Each structure stands twice: as C-alpha cells, then as structure tokens.
C-alpha cells in the first residue's frame, strides 16, 4: 500500500499578530532610515518589549491600541525606543492615548524633565499655593532663590494654584529660577487641544508641564525639537 502524505496549510496569524507584524515592519524601516541598517536593527529588537509595556500601561490592556493605525503605533514605539521614555509604572514619563484612530505619544512633565537631563540640565518643579514664600533675585554672585512651603496638604488643588516654580541647574550649579504664573498657565491651557482630557484628569501635572514648556521656549534648556511634547501620531 502506497504511503499517503497529508499536507496542511499553515495556520494564518491572528488579527492581533498580523497587526503587530505590520507595525513592527514599519518601525524597523523607520529606525533603519534614521539610524542606518545595523543600528536600526539593534534598536528594532526592542519593539516587542516596548509594545508589551505600552499595552500593560493601558486600562484596557491595550485593546484600544489595536484599533489605531499601525503607522501611529509604530511611530509611538519608535519614539519610546529612541527617547527611553516609557509609559506605565508608578512614575511614567509619557502616556499613550488612542484618539481618532491614532495612538498619541503624550509626554508629561516627568518626561520633559528626563529630556532636560539627557542634555545635562536638572529641573525641579514645585507648585506655589497661598501662604508659600517664593523669592528669586540676581546679584554679582548669580541667581538665588528662597522658597518656603507654608500651605496645608489639602490646599494642593489646581483651583488654589498661584504659580509653578521651575528651578534649573546644570552640573549642580544654579542656572535660573523662573516663576510661571497661574495666568500664564491658564493661557496655555485655553490654547490646548486637550482641555477636556489630561487637563481634566491631571490638572496639576499639566500645570507643571506648561511651566517647563515655558522654560524650554525661552531657551533656558536647549532641548532639540525632534521629540514633541504634546503627541506623536503617524506624522511625528
């Protein structure tokens, strides 16, 4: 009796696996174009871990990420890999926000502090509430400041916020102290496209971020423009 060979077709990948394959391919090509083939491949090896961490940081376990375009997912992972700023954990440096079919890479104030650190600057931010003493001045020895917190913990609300103090050092040496007023922060909040999102959920964090952006805009900290602070979608 002749032998009978039975062949089976390979099982097609699941929709999730197919989506990840497409997004990873886009990320690999982007990294290769930016860094060259060899270094790009080395960085691309981090894609799987970056995506797993991103999915774990989401409330739905990453389900909404699969409804976003693979281009935006790939770009968000590329940005995470290149910057080293990741979502999730007790003190994330960024958030990933699915919106309108795109995955937005949203940098918070901790991520902006991390960006400053990458170029050798140390930033501290602190809210100023009623009763706090905040003074800064310059003399022949350079900039100086004095801050005394005198408010109770329950007073720490966005409604009570008077200003955000941004202290900039380089190599441990004081560079500048800037007091960004609530009025300046409100101007930025009103101009933001995210008034109903992060400004509602994390108003104090957004105030800190706005204050740091004000310092960046003034050129006190020379952070490059290759990583934007609001969102990363397929255009970023």
Image: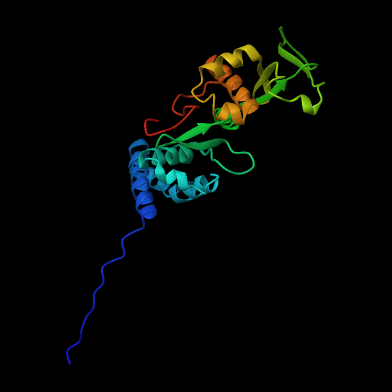
Q: Is residue 188 left or right of residue 146?
A: left
Q: Give the quadrant of the N terminus.
A: bottom left
Vertically, is 84 above or below 5?
Answer: above
Residue beneath the point at 45% across and 24% down: 225
**Residue closest to the far left:** 2
Q: Is residue 78 left or right of residue 171?
A: left
Q: Quadrant of residue 135?
A: top right
Q: Is residue 120 visible?
A: no
**Residue closest to the far top:** 139
Q: Is residue 198 left or right of residue 36?
A: right
**Residue closest to the far front:** 196
Q: Quadrant of residue 70?
A: top left
Vertically, is 191 above or below 153?
Answer: above
Q: Position of residue 46 (x, y in %)?
A: 45, 48
Vertically, is 54 above or below 130?
Answer: below
Q: Quadrant of residue 145?
A: top right
Residue beneath the point at 50% across and 45% down: 54
Q: Is residue 69 visible?
A: yes
Which of these two is toward me, 48 or 117?
48
The coloring applied to the image is rainbow
Residue beneath the point at 34% across and 59% down: 13
Q: Position of residue 137 (x, y in %)?
A: 72, 9
Count of labels in the image:
0
Q: Position of residue 77 (x, y in %)?
A: 44, 41
Which of these two is toward me, 146 or 86?
86
Which of these two is toward me, 105 or 119?
105
Q: Position of residue 195 (x, y in %)?
A: 54, 24
Which of these two is toward me, 212 or 106?
106
Q: Give the quadrant of the C terminus.
A: top left
């Amino acid at each position: 009796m002749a032998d009978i060979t039975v062949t089976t077709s390979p099982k097609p990948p699941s929709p999730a696996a197919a989506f990840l394959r497409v997004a990873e391919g886009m990320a690999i090509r982007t990294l290769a174009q930016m860094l060259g083939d060899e270094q790009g491949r080395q960085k691309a090896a981090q894609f799987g871990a970056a995506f797993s961490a991103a999915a774990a940081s989401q409330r739905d376990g990453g389900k909404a990420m699969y409804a976003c375009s693979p281009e935006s997912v790939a770009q968000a992972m590329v940005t995470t890999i290149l910057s080293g700023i990741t979502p999730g954990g007790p003190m994330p440096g960024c958030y990933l926000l699915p919106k309108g079919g795109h995955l937005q890479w949203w940098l918070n104030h901790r991520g902006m502090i991390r960006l400053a650190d990458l170029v050798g600057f140390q930033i501290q931010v602190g809210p100023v509430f009623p009763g706090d003493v905040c003074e800064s001045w310059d003399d022949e020895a350079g900039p100086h400041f004095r801050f005394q917190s005198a408010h109770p913990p329950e007073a720490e609300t966005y409604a009570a916020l008077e200003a955000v103090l941004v202290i900039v050092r380089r190599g441990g040496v004081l560079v500048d102290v800037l007091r960004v007023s609530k009025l300046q922060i409100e101007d930025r909040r009103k101009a933001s496209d995210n008034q109903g999102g992060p400004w509602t959920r994390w108003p104090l964090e957004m105030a800190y971020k706005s204050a740091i952006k004000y310092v960046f805009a003034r050129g006190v900290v020379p952070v490059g423009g290759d990583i934007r602070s609001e969102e990363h979608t397929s255009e970023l």
